[in-house]
Image: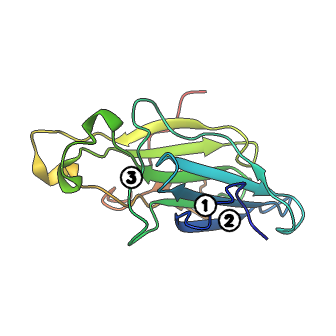
């Protein structure tokens, strides 16, 4: 079954990630359409993947450019906690910096949280980059892991087992 409504045979979606809601069984796919906007797209299926609907937008303006290549993905990862809260981790650049070499574009790390299975998101910047420090700018692949014992703890690479700041409600 085709998930997106894009009929273009040359479309490119970078390494879609699939997660299943622990209570409802709904499927959620998060992916990056690298030829159609460069943002993170979310798709939801309540019937085992036979049909799909568009989910919410996790991007935080002005950082809406997740990736511009369909290589070496994934560029977004997904995880449900045991209470059915969906988390996405991704990096994104400001499109205004698109003229910079890909390796020199500042890419903060974001964590998006959804309590309605991906229909809407609250997003927070979990890691701020410093444009003057080259060691911090070339982030490309955000990862998320939810602590199975304490879903209030969300971890990402380099976090040294510290929880991600929770988005304000």
Q: Secondary structure at mark 2?
A: strand
Q: Secondary structure at mark 3?
A: loop
* Circle number at residue 19: 2
Q: Secondary structure at mark 1?
A: strand
Question: Could you tell whether 37 is left or right of 46 in the image?
Answer: left
Assign the N terminus to one quadrant of the image: bottom right
Pick whichever, 152 or 81, lies toward us.
81
- What percent of the width, then of the height, locates residue 145? 51, 62
- What percent of the width, then of the height, locates residue 112? 54, 43
In the image, residue 69 above or below residue 111: below
Which label's residue is closer to the chain start, 3 or 2?
2
**Residue 152 visible somewhere in the drawing:** no
Q: How is the image coloured?
A: rainbow
Name the front one of labels 3 and 1: 1
Q: Which residue is mark 1?
A: 79
Pick whichever, 90 or 156, lies toward us.
90
- Residue drawn at x 60%, y 57% is 30
Q: Which residue is mark 3?
A: 162
Question: Could you tell whether 138 is left or right of 111 in the image?
Answer: left
In the image, residue 112 above or below residue 6: above
- Residue drawn at x 46%, y 67% is 74
- Residue drawn at x 18%, y 51% is 101
Q: Are marks 3 and 1 in contact (CB under 8 Å)?
A: no
- What percent of the width, then of the height, locates residue 121? 63, 38
Assign the C terminus to one quadrant of the image: top right
In the image, residue 144 above or below residue 50: above
């Amino acid at each position: 079954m085709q998930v997106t409504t894009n009929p273009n045979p040359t479309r490119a979606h970078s390494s879609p990630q699939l997660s299943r809601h622990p209570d409802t069984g709904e499927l959620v796919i998060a992916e990056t359409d690298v030829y159609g906007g460069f943002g993170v797209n979310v798709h939801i299926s309540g019937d085992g993947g036979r049909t799909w609907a568009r989910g919410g937008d996790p991007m935080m303006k002005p950082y809406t450019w997740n990736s511009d290549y369909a290589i070496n993905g994934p560029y977004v990862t997904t995880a449900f906690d045991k209470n059915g809260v969906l988390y996405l981790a991704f990096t994104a650049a400001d499109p205004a910096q698109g003229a910079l070499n890909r390796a020199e574009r500042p890419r903060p790390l974001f964590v998006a949280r959804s309590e309605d299975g991906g229909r809407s998101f609250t997003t927070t910047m979990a890691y701020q980059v410093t444009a003057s420090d080259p060691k911090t700018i070339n982030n490309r692949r955000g990862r998320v892991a939810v602590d199975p014992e304490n879903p209030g703890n969300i971890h990402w690479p380099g976090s040294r087992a510290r929880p991600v700041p929770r988005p304000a409600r």
